[in-house]
Image (cartoon, coloured by chain):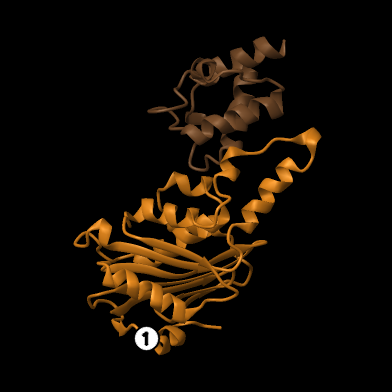
Amino acid sequence: MEELIEKIKIDIIEQLNLEDVNKEEVGPDDLLFGEGLGLDSIDALELIVLLEKKYGVKVASPEEGKEIFKSLRTLAQYVQEKAG
Amino acid sequence: MYINASVQLSNQTLYKNGVKMVDWPEQEELKSLFKKRQTVYPKFYKMDNLCKLGILSSELLLEGLELEAIEPEQRSLVIQNAHASLDTDQRHQSSISNPKEYFPSPAVFVYTLSNIVLGEMAIRYNFKGENACTSHRELDIEKLIVDTSILVEEGTQTCMAGWLNFYNDKYDAILFLIETTKRGMALPFSIDNLTELIHK
């Protein structure tokens, strides 16, 4: 799980052009939106594309997204669960 | 009306108020230029190249100038370019051209309009007045004067006006700060003075 979290973290920083983010400072349970990493609504759409493109995992509903995109850990759990 | 400041930025040179400031031996990327300024604005890195050019040029144009006395609604933008958002349009196109690899990026798609750069500049510098974005083969100074003058007649006190073009890694920006009161260079707003400030 920790390895997957790390991989997703690197993918997010790269895909979302988070140039000013130091990857060492982002913890697995930090919030991705709001006061955490500060992602916005376009980033949320970009995350949906990233999950499908790199992990073959689809997010079906926006409501589901709220929980999945809470932190790196919830994202990794979802990927692990769906990717089987 | 006065031309109070100007900036001309391309891959290889930077002119400020008509004076050459830097000559880069190699073509300089917008991202590395912005990083060197140590400006904290994370959104910059998420923007497309045309918007990066708009923000960096504005940053250079407005540095050291106080805008607080001017109401945001009295600050306007008049921008021209040749390639509109074609650079980003083509990036988007390449992400959807293969049906088997169909992954359009929302972060790219939102920049597929030429006037988005005006929105980014307006947000960053609180320019909430009118704005105009038109496409031409090259900078049309007469039209720039007409458009800026109309906005001033309608209450604009400060206007960033000029040219922002990005295509195939080649960029070219010419921005003037046109204001109703004197400061900085304080050159009368005329075709001759605008032309003289542009280095071919």
Residue at (56% x, 31% y) in the render: A45
Query: Residue B147 is drawn in which quadrant?
Result: bottom left
Indicate the position of residue A54 as horizontal and vertical percent values. 70, 28
- Quarter of the C terminus of chain B within the rendering: bottom right
A42 vs B138: above or below: above
Residue A9: x and y in percent read: 58, 28
Extreme-left residue of the structure = B69
**Would you say B27 lies left or right of B64 here?**
right
Say which amino acid is labelled 1: Ser
Which quadrant holds residue B11? bottom right
> Looking at the picture, does residue B2 appear above or below residue B104?
below
Q: Which residue appears farthest toward the bottom when viewing the image?
A: B192
Q: Which chain is orange?
A: B
Q: Label 1 is found on which chain of the structure?
A: B
Residue at coordinates 33% horizontally, 75% vertically from top-left?
A: B149
Decide: is B140 above or below A24: below
Q: How many marks?
A: 1
Can residue A80 be seen in this snapshot? yes
Q: Quadrant of the N terminus of chain B?
A: bottom left
Crowdedness of circle 1 by 10 Å Cα count: few (<14), some, many (20+)? Answer: some
Residue at image coords 49%, 37%: A21
Please state the horizontal and vertical placement of residue B183, each as a whole percent of the image.
25, 76
- Determine the image quadrant of residue B99: top right
Residue B16 appears in view: no
Colour applied to chain A: brown
> Measuring 45% from the left and 81% from the top, which residue is drawn there?
B142
Q: Report helix, strand or loop for mark 1.
A: loop
* Label 1 sits on residue: B190
- Residue B100 at x, y percent in the picture: 80, 33
